Image: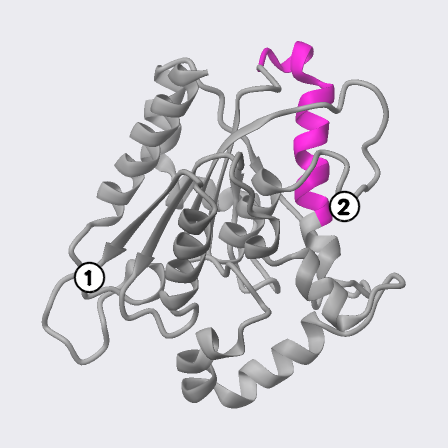
């Protein structure tokens, strides 16, 4: 299941056709279904708590599970993949219990198992400010206004409670599903230190985690401004990482 990015204020499920065109082709050819989802974002007229964006993604998985017979999918062989804002949600969908962040899709048949999560340059925690220092230094005003929007108390939850709920590092366990993190080494928007942090935290708990650094790459694996060096991986090469990893996880189960 692909979860799009967009800074929590934009993006649509149609991003799969540009971000995952090769993935769509190769995984479906291998007999693996691919779903791409929409979720509510800020700035569309609805008053939201940040956790509700994650709730929508959890609901999408519950919907797929509840309709698995009709869709011809195995609800106990799910993998989540997300880019940027979607990466953080892919992690939460994999690392949290089925009934955490309950939404509109409830009842029997929503049981599911996420067997792995892939995050491309996604946030992994909102509780360690120093990991965000590169972004805060480069985009101070934008970072402050976004933080105020995302972490205002909502739905009976305090700002701190929301941060804990949506921070992947708070949900790691020794038996958590395997994680693949892919991140540009000079990303100013979501610093690579966030992926390094989750990698270290998962390793310390005995978890199965891999981190691939794309060198000479900013956010979205784009070339670094002012540098002649090309990113060490093309976008298609990063898609191939997803294809190989998903097939490996599915075959193991």
Display coloring: one colour
- Numbered circle sitting on residue 215: 1
Residue at figure coordinates x 86%, y 25% from the top left: 107
Q: Is residue 154 left or right of residue 229?
A: right
Q: Which residue is mark 2?
A: 101
- Percent position of residue 119, x then y: 44, 48
Mark 2–mark 1 distance (CA, rounded to whole Å): 36 Å
Residue at figure coordinates x 43%, y 19% from the top left: 250
- Percent position of residue 75, x then y: 62, 19
Q: Nearer the viewer, residue 186 or 160?
A: 160
Q: Main secondary structure of the magenta part?
A: helix
Magenta stretch bounds: 55-73
At numbered mark 2, what does the secondary structure look like: helix, strand or loop? loop
* Residue 3 visible to an observer of this rendering: yes
Q: Is residue 40 above or below residue 7?
A: above
- Percent position of residue 124, x then y: 51, 59
Q: Is residue 233 shown in magenta?
A: no
Q: Quadrant of residue 98?
A: top right
Q: Is residue 141 above or below residue 134?
A: below
């Amino acid at each position: 299941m692909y979860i799009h990015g967009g800074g929590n204020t934009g993006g649509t499920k149609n991003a799969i056709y540009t971000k995952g065109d090769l993935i769509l082709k190769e995984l479906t050819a291998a007999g693996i279904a691919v779903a791409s989802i929409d979720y509510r974002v800020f700035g569309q007229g609805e008053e939201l708590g940040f956790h509700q964006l994650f709730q929508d993604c959890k609901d999408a998985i519950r919907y797929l599970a509840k309709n698995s017979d009709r869709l011809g999918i195995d609800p106990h062989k799910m993998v989540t993949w997300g880019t940027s804002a979607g990466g953080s949600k892919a992690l939460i969908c994999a690392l949290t219990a089925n009934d955490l962040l309950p939404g509109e899709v409830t009842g029997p048949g929503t049981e599911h198992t996420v067997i792995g999560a892939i995050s491309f340059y996604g946030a992994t925690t909102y509780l360690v400010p120093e990991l965000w220092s590169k972004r805060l230094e480069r985009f101070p005003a934008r970072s402050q206004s976004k933080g105020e929007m995302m972490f205002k108390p909502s739905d009976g939850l305090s700002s701190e409670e929301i941060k804990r709920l949506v921070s992947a590092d708070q949900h790691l366990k020794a038996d958590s599903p395997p994680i693949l993190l892919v991140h540009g080494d000079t990303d100013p928007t979501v610093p690579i230190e966030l992926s390094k942090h989750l990698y270290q935290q998962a390793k310390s708990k005995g978890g199965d985690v891999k981190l691939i650094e794309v060198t000479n790459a900013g956010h979205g694996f784009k070339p670094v401004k002012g540098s002649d060096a090309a990113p060490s991986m093309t976008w298609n090469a990063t898609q191939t990482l997803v294809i190989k990893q998903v097939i490996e996880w599915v075959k193991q189960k």
